Image (cartoon, coloured by chain):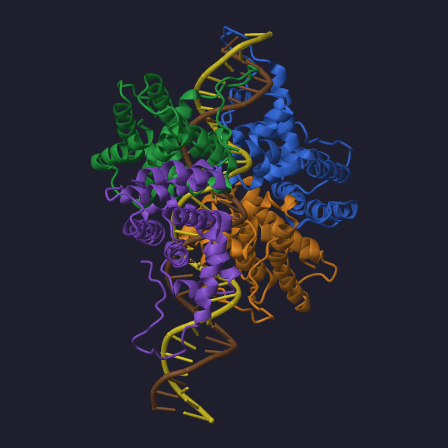
Chain colours: A blue, B orange, C purple, D green, E yellow, F brown
Amino acid sequence: MPSAPDATHPTPRRGRPRDATRDDALRRATLEMLAEVGYRALTMDAVAARARAGKATIYRRWDSKGALVVDAFAREAQRSVPVPDTGSVAGDLREHLDATARLLAGPVGRAAQALVGELPHEPELAAAFRASFVTGQRCAVDAVLRRAAERGEIRSDAPVAAVAEITGAALTHRSMLSGQQLDGPFLDGLVDRVLLPLLRP
Amino acid sequence: MPSAPDATHPTPRRGRPRDATRDDALRRATLEMLAEVGYRALTMDAVAARARAGKATIYRRWDSKGALVVDAFAREAQRSVPVPDTGSVAGDLREHLDATARLLAGPVGRAAQALVGELPHEPELAAAFRASFVTGQRCAVDAVLRRAAERGEIRSDAPVAAVAEITGAALTHRSMLSGQQLDGPFLDGLVDRVLLPLLRP
Amino acid sequence: MPSAPDATHPTPRRGRPRDATRDDALRRATLEMLAEVGYRALTMDAVAARARAGKATIYRRWDSKGALVVDAFAREAQRSVPVPDTGSVAGDLREHLDATARLLAGPVGRAAQALVGELPHEPELAAAFRASFVTGQRCAVDAVLRRAAERGEIRSDAPVAAVAEITGAALTHRSMLSGQQLDGPFLDGLVDRVLLPLLRP
Amino acid sequence: MPSAPDATHPTPRRGRPRDATRDDALRRATLEMLAEVGYRALTMDAVAARARAGKATIYRRWDSKGALVVDAFAREAQRSVPVPDTGSVAGDLREHLDATARLLAGPVGRAAQALVGELPHEPELAAAFRASFVTGQRCAVDAVLRRAAERGEIRSDAPVAAVAEITGAALTHRSMLSGQQLDGPFLDGLVDRVLLPLLRP
DNA sequence: GATTAATCGAGACGGTACGTCAAGTCTTGAT
DNA sequence: ATCAAGACTTGACGTACCGTCTCGATTAATC
């Protein structure tokens, strides 16, 4: 159902080819509105108007509002998670936390929050959301911890997977649910009093 | 804007008083539908029909669909978080996790997820959501840890607040975002490899 | 269905007796609103508010909006048609026309017009309307012509019934349908060029 | 306010043009329901359902229920008044009366009656009503009498305008107000004892 | 004089129709 | 075959009205 517009078409179709610039304009408009007004208040007419496109141009590329939002969101979320490499696990974690906190405070974070409520009823949206947003963040922490293990900075039996999961959980919980600040002191405390104690020899 | 129907009226108003049984029927119908079809697909007509009420009866009590859902949700969520007392911090935590996992898998959890996306655009909903859902869970863990501290089971400098927050974060993250099972092994691991290690002397 | 509030009750009921002043206030409010906004836009709530009455007080007296309007209208229309007696048929007709034109231009006329569209679907309203409004006017002309016949002013085979009908038809047609003025010249012409020529020897 | 859908558009607008078949279907459905249940009980949902149209399609063309009804009615009424030509004024009048009586007994007549009560509060409806319904009938009689005058069948000083007006008045009065039959004997009497006597040399 | 029962104003109740707006489809002329 | 524009059906929105009902407070007739 998501039916993201595929860049490569096997059969070079007849007639006027699709205007690839429209894809970008529509995805951009979608993300902007998603961050501004949320999923429910995002209307297809408004997206079309903002991108100076017709609604048919949208529905030619995506099957539904959900598919459009998924694709626009996933494409943005995927390339947003950095894997830092400062040389120490403490530095890597702290930098990852900072980057993720900035991500959550920005358009991608607001868009992600807008989508949470739709996940149970839209399996394809859920799959894309998890693949891009949830897994992306977790893999970054996994990579950080794997390097730390290779350097011998952390115990061999450290609960790596749990730490990776908890890192993302703590950040999204503050950002989306509790409404508390994702500020420096919080991130410091998270690293120093939770994550590192769970990993250290 | 939520404008929950107030139980106590200072001025004994004139005219026919509101029928308190309608409040309950409407809130119940709302929660049922919220859990069944989600926030977006929940329609006021359907709520009215299920509660055998007129739409005017709903709008006399709540200003909008959002206000109704908030109130129905908050009232249910508030009384749903148990504070266990098994005698040991391990037992208390495990029981709290079990209870909260059941809560998240049930109507309240599904309703909470349905509301997450609306929080940024509805401050009153956000306030009610946090007061009933987020804070309720955190306070339960706080109480458990306070008792554990009195019994000397945990270090005096244990990161109590962080543990309380992480507990909720881990559960809601699995339930709402990652889509992974909130099953026994996960809860076991959470207690044994994350929470207790952070608390133990 | 009309169920006009009966003045004389055979069984002097127990309990608080009905307040007869409410009948008048409600009928007056009804006629005012009927003339002001028409039948469709007349609401029971507005009638109650204008008469400073509760809706139950209305429905205790009349079964429906239709019944209330019928009764209020018929009672006013019935006592509004004068039977002039100037001594000559020309004078009588002209005076009757003047009086009826004033009647049609006033609240009763506006109320009557508001009811026309409802007649086909409300038989009791239709019966009351005809008995009070249509027949009343026709009988007045009949009486005038009968006296004229007794005085020998008109032919013995004059189309009395037709003239009576046409008189009312001409007036209501102008007042309700054509929108033209029911002014002196028109009434003069009606008497001198239509009615009298049909009657004169 | 009526805002009848205009057939001729000066500016060849962009986008999908309005589907002219919807206009017809909606007007037809409106007239049918108007004749069946009257103005008050005519609902926009029912009109839309009967025409297999959406309500938005109606409101794109007409501003309100009133405007729709006016337009549907006027368009039908305009083309419904015949101007007979039998060769004699008696025959012409009788045929006109017959045709008009049939018209009044049919959908157009019932619709006209349903609209009478709205005329005082909707000037545009009133204008359209008079232009199509009232004036149409009067002009037909005028034409008949003009031909009769040319043939010398009627007096040169006959009250032509008054006769035209009275003809319509007598018919609508019976049809809408008095509830009496518009049958052959009545029409005979109207021609022989009222109209012709007023015209004959 | 206390009781009883029907009234009063006020307004909540279940329904139904209103007129608006969004989702997703279809139809123009033009590129 | 694509594009922008916009009309199309469907269905939910929040409001207003109808006729019924229930509340506390009157007000006569009965006890």
What x and y, as percent, mark residue D56? Answer: 48, 32
Q: Judge by depth and name the residue closer to the eye, D190 or B52.
A: D190
Q: Is residue C11 above or below residue B172?
A: below
User: What residue do we see at 67% from left, 65% from top?
Assistant: B146
Q: Judge by depth and name the residue closer to the eye, A147 or C9.
A: C9
Question: Which quarter of the figure has residue A55?
Answer: top right
User: What residue do we see at 34% from left, 78% from top?
Assistant: C13
Question: Which quarter of the figure has residue A96?
Answer: top right
What x and y, as percent, mark residue D132? Answer: 42, 28
What x and y, as percent, mark residue D36? Answer: 31, 38
Q: Judge by depth and name the residue closer to the eye, D187 or D159.
A: D159
The quadrant of the image that shows the C terminus of chain B is bottom right
Residue D29 shows in this picture: yes
Question: Which quarter of the figure has residue B134?
Answer: bottom right
Name the side, left or right, on which D143 lies relative to C107.
Answer: left
How many numbered badges does the structure rendering display? 0
Residue D37 shows in this picture: no
Q: Residue furthest left?
A: D185
Q: Judge by depth and name the residue closer to the eye, B50 or A67.
A: B50
What x and y, as percent, mark residue D64? Answer: 49, 36
Name the side, left or right, on which D5 lies relative to B122.
Answer: left
User: What residue do we see at 54% from left, 8% from top?
Assistant: A16
Name the side, left or right, on which C157 lies relative to C4.
Answer: left
